[in-house]
Image (tube, grey):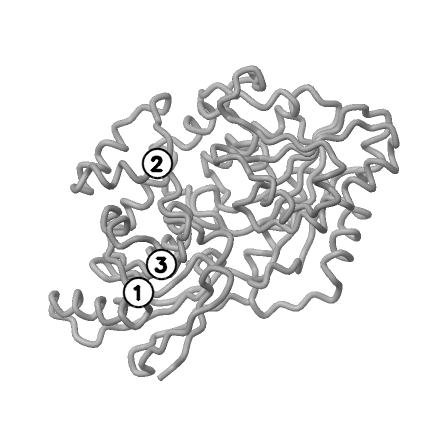
Amino acid sequence: MSVISIPYGEGRVSCELPDDRLSGVLVPELHEYIPEKSGEELIRDAMEHPIGSPTLRELAKGKKRVVIIASDHTRPVPSRLIIPEMLRQIREGNPEAEITILVATGCHRPSRRDELIRKFGEEIVGRERIVIHDCDDKDGLVPAGTLPSGGELVLNRLAVECDLLTAEGFIEPHFFAGFSGGRKSVLPGIASRSTVLYNHNSAFIGSPEARTGNLERNPIHEDMVYAARRAKLAFIVNVVINPEKKVIFAAAGDMEKAHAEGCRFLDGLCRINAPEADIVITSNGGYPLDQNIYQAVKGMTAAEALVKKGGVIIMLARAEDGHGGESFWRTFRDQPDLRAMMDGFLGTPPDRTIVDQWQSQIFARVLMKAAVIFVSDAPDELVRQFHMIPAGSPEEAAAAADRLLLEKGITRGSILAIPDGVSVIAG
């Protein structure tokens, strides 16, 4: 038997798998990469040698109102390392700068004070001006143009009206934007709900180019780049982190050029080829990405790419916060027919996209390819409402998967393990 360790919440769980059925354990080189410098040094070096841009201190000269777009509580960005260095350089360039840290919640709930402290530290929370973006606050939003796709671009007023707009972030494989980071700080980060909904429309989500690890001809990415340019996002500091959430790479400077450098680095460490399997076991990489079912869909897409049609995905995500999206939950609770659900998504015009439709569409696509057994702390009834099978442990899930396959006449199906689903680019 092989023992596989899988991230779960802030810890890990072990899963025993029979050697004669295990077709592979996909661990990207990202997990083994050891940088020559500490995270602090990597960030500082990147900022001192920006890509396609002057340094942040140079950009800050003569700029009174400066905004730093920061990630929210759902992203494991090491803001405690990045933000102090950004603040230092801005103030070196202009000691009189009025700096606002704008928390990019997108359409998420507001970050609580304790979450901000955990992210930035007591000193920054107590000393700096921090504003949390509200995608529904009409007074705090302003028009900023028309997206290439035709949707109206509406962004946070603070960002649009500032003298210098900057952003922190991290780059990871993203299940429809290709990669996170860079332009995503603006769209969806500080955009209006209507703009986010238009960008996440069913046609774009259904595009074969809107997939993990792909930016070429990706319509979602193209809208996001336009939005960031319209907002005049002048400087980014983006990092790549390992499973321990430690910085192993940093890129700073021009929003597109620095982001592209980070994406190239990450792609070289995360892209893996493997044969399809009857059962794929994966996770969402642990906290904070496995706090709810909504976020867990991301890790499932790695399994979706490598599970056989009609196979089984075993997903481990603590999901202590439950469903993660009211509309997302109601969609699955109220519609037992996945085909009818998908037809409804595909028939929805871009300007009528509803909240969380994109996540529901992708999740429905996963469920239409394979059964999903969900190992979590979420209530069993909630898991069933999402058309999944609840399980209390990996062993219980594996036994349930075998029963499902046996009903199809498959005995001792092949098993593929992807311990960290969000860090893998399949193909």
Which residue does the numbered mark 2 point to in the structure image? 326
Q: Earlier in the sequence, mark 1 or mark 2?
A: 2
Would you place residue 177 above or below residue 203 in this image? below
* Disc number for residue 392: 1
Local crowd size for mark 3, using a 10 Å CA cut-off: few (<14), some (14–19), many (≥20)? many
At label 1, the amino acid type is Gly
Q: Give the percent coordinates (x, y) of residue 403.
A: 16, 69
Residue at disc 3, secondary structure: loop
Q: Give the percent coordinates (x, y) of residue 302.
A: 39, 56
The picture quadrant where one finds residue 404 is bottom left
Q: Nearer the viewer, residue 154 or 262?
A: 154
Local crowd size for mark 1, using a 10 Å CA cut-off: few (<14), some (14–19), many (≥20)? some
Residue 226: in sight, yes or no?
no
Residue at disc 1, secondary structure: loop
Local crowd size for mark 2, using a 10 Å CA cut-off: few (<14), some (14–19), many (≥20)? few
At label 3, the amino acid type is Ser
Quadrant of the rendering where the N terminus is positioned: bottom left
Q: Give the percent coordinates (x, y) of residue 149.
A: 45, 25
Which residue does the numbered mark 3 point to in the structure image? 376
Q: Give the percent coordinates (x, y) of residue 304.
A: 33, 55
The picture quadrant where one finds residue 4 is bottom left
At label 2, the amino acid type is Glu
| Residue at (48% x, 35% y) in the render | 109
Q: Earlier in the sequence, mark 3 or mark 1?
A: 3
